Image (cartoon, rainbow, N blue to C red):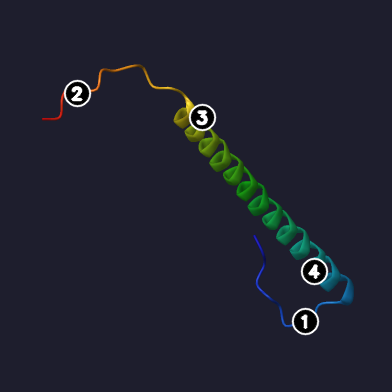
């Protein structure tokens, strides 16, 4: 929780600490977003590979209902 701003001007060292905290927080946020995007991409790629492997597998032999003479 942050205290409300006072009428005093912050010192250079206070500004540097606040900037470092903000930069650290933003870096953590961006790393978290990047990690979740990579995880989502990996999951989508795995799902696509699973769908492709099902497509390649031969289906069980079923009799063709259209077999027989045409006319």
Q: Which label sits in the foreground, 3 or 1?
A: 3
Disc 4, SS: helix
Residue at the far left: name it. 71
* Label 1 Cα neighbours within 10 Å, binned few <14 / some 14-19 / many ≥20: few
Callouts 1 and 4 close, C-beta under 8 Å: no
Distance from the alpha carbon under mark 3 to that under mark 4: 51 Å
Can you tell which mark lies on residue 65? 2
Distance from the alpha carbon under mark 3 to that under mark 1: 67 Å
Q: Position of residue 43 (x, y in %)?
A: 56, 39
Distance from the alpha carbon under mark 1 to that under mark 2: 87 Å
Classify 38 as above or below 21.
above
Q: Which residue is mark 1?
A: 8
Q: Position of residue 15 (x, y in %)?
A: 82, 73
Q: Position of residue 69 (x, y in %)?
A: 15, 24
Residue at the far front: name it. 71
Q: Along the polypeptide, which appears first: circle 4 or circle 2?
A: 4
Q: Which residue is mark 4?
A: 19
Distance from the alpha carbon under mark 3 to that under mark 2: 27 Å
6 left or right, relative to 61: right
Callouts 3 and 4 close, C-beta under 8 Å: no
């Amino acid at each position: 929780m942050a205290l409300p701003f006072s009428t005093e001007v912050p010192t250079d060292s206070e500004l540097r600490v606040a900037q470092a905290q903000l930069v650290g927080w933003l870096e953590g946020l961006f790393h978290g977003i990047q990690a979740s995007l990579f995880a989502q991409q990996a999951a989508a790629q795995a799902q696509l590979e699973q769908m492709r492997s099902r497509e390649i597998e031969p289906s069980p032999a079923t009799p063709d209902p259209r077999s027989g003479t045409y006319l």
